[in-house]
Image (cartoon, helix red, strand yellow):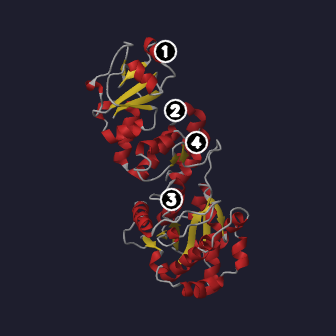
Amino acid sequence: MTDILDELEWRDVIAQTTDADALRKALAEGPITVYAGFDPTAPSIHMGNLATLLILTRFQRAGHRPIALVGGATGLIGDPSGRSTERSLNSSDVVADWVSRIRGQVERFLSFDGGPASATVVSNLEWTGKMSAIDFLRDVGKHFPVNRMLARESVAARLGGEGLSYTEFSYQILQANDYLELYRRHDCALQLGGSDQWGNITAGVDLIRRVEGAHVHGLTGKLITKADGTKFGKTAGGAIWLDPALTSPYAFYQYWLNADDRDVVRFLKVFTFRSQEEIAELEKAVAERPAARVAQRTLAEDVTTLVHGEAELARVVAASRALFGQGSLEELDARTLESALAEVPKATVPALGMSYVDLLAESGLVDSKSAARRAVKEGGAYLNNVKITDEEYVPGQDDLLHGRFLVLRRGKRTIGGVEVA
């Protein structure tokens, strides 16, 4: 079996473990069952969740049995970890829908081949929904000293600010009970989570020790940050989601393609299955040929394929090339083209009739009509990758792509668009 801890340490993803030596010994003795939880607080998981999911996937590839828990119960409550304000509670119907969506996303990353390391996906509503308030308080709550609960970082931080409802205060008990249930049902001996889950994870480890007298383990992944100080997994428009309806595959690909040289090697370690030797070569390329952006292209292609598949990768690569004059815009499907133009300056007009110069200015690609005319005069103005030399040119119906779009370009790299509504 692969030494998974050595692998994770090389990839620099481990933040904390409850007992590293004991965990290493347990892993060396044979396959163990390991779980990670994903709460349905949105209709999709995001890049931070993916970092944890890939750690779970690596455990499976090393021969261990993974359980992905989708929080049908805890999603109704809301985890206070990492938050300064109370979550808005969603209805049971909304949460059930999100559970279904997230379950489908999680399943794509795991193997269900029926072998000894075959994955399992569960919802904690299965056992929590059957538990009465009295049973919860008597059988689980009695094992939680309030002074310890108050000392947990996620709770203490909130008590020093806007406060915390009993609903969210009880979250750590619910998550701890999940670990206990999975220990009893599946002999689960390791829980994974993000670094903000440390208090919840150790609560479960302690509960199993108190109730079952067993020694189990916890491991958290490092918080991923960006070298420029901005939050990882965010764009100007919001989070990077795995659901293509929330973050288009084109925007997803571009996010990784635009990774900073200071971040790209770390992202390759966390989000791809490239080997140590392959990543060393890519790191060398960053140092010696940064302008070629070989590492960024590898990262973007690997992660886009992992999340969206090879066919979608081919579409977004074709779109990226075509927008910059290296391919045919006419061959792009309407959905891919629309997604690509959503990421660049774009004007929406009710009908054709404006001149190219007016459209260039309207799109925001240039600051003024005089700047647009100057771009035409200097030979740096393009419509659908065709150079425009006439300042008075008015695009017609034949210029529209899919009957709706015009692609504008100034110079080699500055792209804009027009949509006829």
Dot 1 falls on a residue whose secondary structure is: helix
Dot 3 falls on a residue whose secondary structure is: helix
Q: Amino acid at mark 2?
A: Ala
Which is in the foreground here, disc 3 or disc 1? 1
Q: Is residue 146 above or below residue 360?
A: below
* CA distance separating discs 4 and 1: 44 Å
Say which residue label 3 marks.
54
Which is in the foreground here, disc 4 or disc 1? 1
- Residue 112: x, y in percent? 38, 68
| Mark before the other along the chain sequence, 2 or 1 | 2
Say which residue label 4 marks.
283
Dot 2 falls on a residue whose secondary structure is: helix
Say which residue label 2 marks.
292
- Residue 125: x, y in percent? 46, 75
Residue 130: assigned label: none
* CA distance separating discs 2 and 1: 34 Å
Q: Is residue 25 visible?
A: no
- Residue 191: x, y in percent? 57, 70
Task: Identify the residue at image location x=54%, y=49%.
Answer: 233
Task: Identify the residue at image location x=64%, y=73%.
Answer: 202
| Mark before the other along the chain sequence, 4 or 2 | 4
